[in-house]
Image: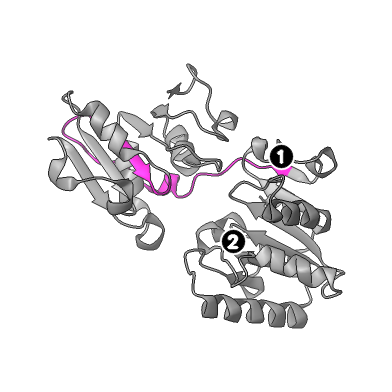
Amino acid sequence: MGKALARYAMKDVFLVVDPRFERLFPSVSANNVLRIASRNRSNLRVIKVLAKLIALLITRKPKVVVFAGVATKTPFVLDVVTFFIVCKRFGFFREKRILVWVNKTFESEKGRIVGRIQTHHLKRIDKIITYYKSSTEHLDAEHEGKFTFVPLPAFHVNQTRPQQAMKPYVFSGGESQRDFASLVSAIRSFPVNLIISTLGVGEQHLDQSQLPKGVCVKVGDRFNKGPEEYLSDLAGATVVVVPLLETNDPKGLTTIVEALVYGKAIISTRSRGLDDYLQHGYNCLRV
């Protein structure tokens, strides 16, 4: 990520970031960082964040504003990036350059108001940094040159040792759009030990009372409580499985990148955005 900002003096860069991704920008001064937790959906909280952002931009006077992994919504269902672009359109912060690091689809949804707004605002974004190349496949050719592909890095993997397991086991982890129920169903008739590490059992449609022998479910937020146990379980596994539900956004990439760094055998659902990292029969099996 540093290469994308190399042309700018760090004192001229202001970062608006989800705390989970702040480590991607170690060169940016802590005084020039505004942290926004993407899971905080409170309208009052968002209004306060936007007011603070405007005040900081006026006082710090950065030349470049970087939005990284920010998904907080305003009361009008516009994210903070769109809010900033609207400010520029009406004459505020017009001299500032905008860089956006996206962790989801940024595409034109033809026939939809949101899609037209996104496409229109692309004209006012100077550079979009994305971690999967297919993010441009539905955009007009005039916008494709604004995208820079930067592979998603693995966090903390060099700081975590694999757990010492008595028996080989399969690991599956992550949060959104995971199909853990199908995975459990698939291994039910086999003598397989499975560790599932997830944010919440309820939303993954898992009934712990009906789990087969050898399946262990660990519930917790890896970002808030720390990734050590999660990565230790992943690093000690024989096979890492990434079962995904159908989605338009790239999902499972963090787990996949971590598994690749540890040299694990990977089984993954075929899903958008994964072709940049996985090749069937070479470093994974895709089903």
Dot 2 crowding, Cα within 10 Å, few <14, some 14–19, many 20+: many
| Percent x, y of residue 135 | 66, 40
> Which of the marked residues, 2 or 1, is nearer the chain's N terminus?
2
Of residues 256 and 46, which is closer to you in this image? 46
Side of 39 where 187 appears, left or right: left
Residue 116: give its label: none
Label 2 to label 1: alpha-carbon separation = 19 Å
Instruction: Identify residue for label 1.
Output: 136
| Percent x, y of residue 187 | 23, 27
Residue 70: give its label: 2
Dot 1 crowding, Cα within 10 Å, few <14, some 14–19, many 20+: some
User: In the picture shown, does residue 100 fall above or below 136?
Assistant: below
Of residues 143 and 12, which is closer to you in this image? 143
Residue drawn where x is 32% and y is 47% of the image: 204
Quarter-of-image position of residue 216: top left
Q: Quadrant of the C terminus?
A: top left
User: In the picture shown, does residue 54 fall above or below 188?
Assistant: below
| Residue 5 in view (yes/no) | no
Residue drawn where x is 64% and y is 65% of the image: 78
> Are the residues at dot 2 and dot 1 in contact (C-beta closer than 8 Å)?
no
Instruction: State the residue lying farthest toward the top.
Output: 281
Quarter-of-image position of residue 50: bottom right
| Percent x, y of residue 98 | 77, 61
Dot 1 lies on which element? helix
Q: Tell me which segment is drawn in magenta.
A: 148-176
Nearer the camera: disc 2 or disc 1: 1
Quarter-of-image position of residue 168: top left
What secondary structure predominates along the stretch shown in magenta? loop
Residue drawn where x is 25% and y is 45% of the image: 206
The amino acid type of the residue labelled 1 equals Thr
| Percent x, y of residue 281 | 47, 16
Dot 2 lies on which element? loop
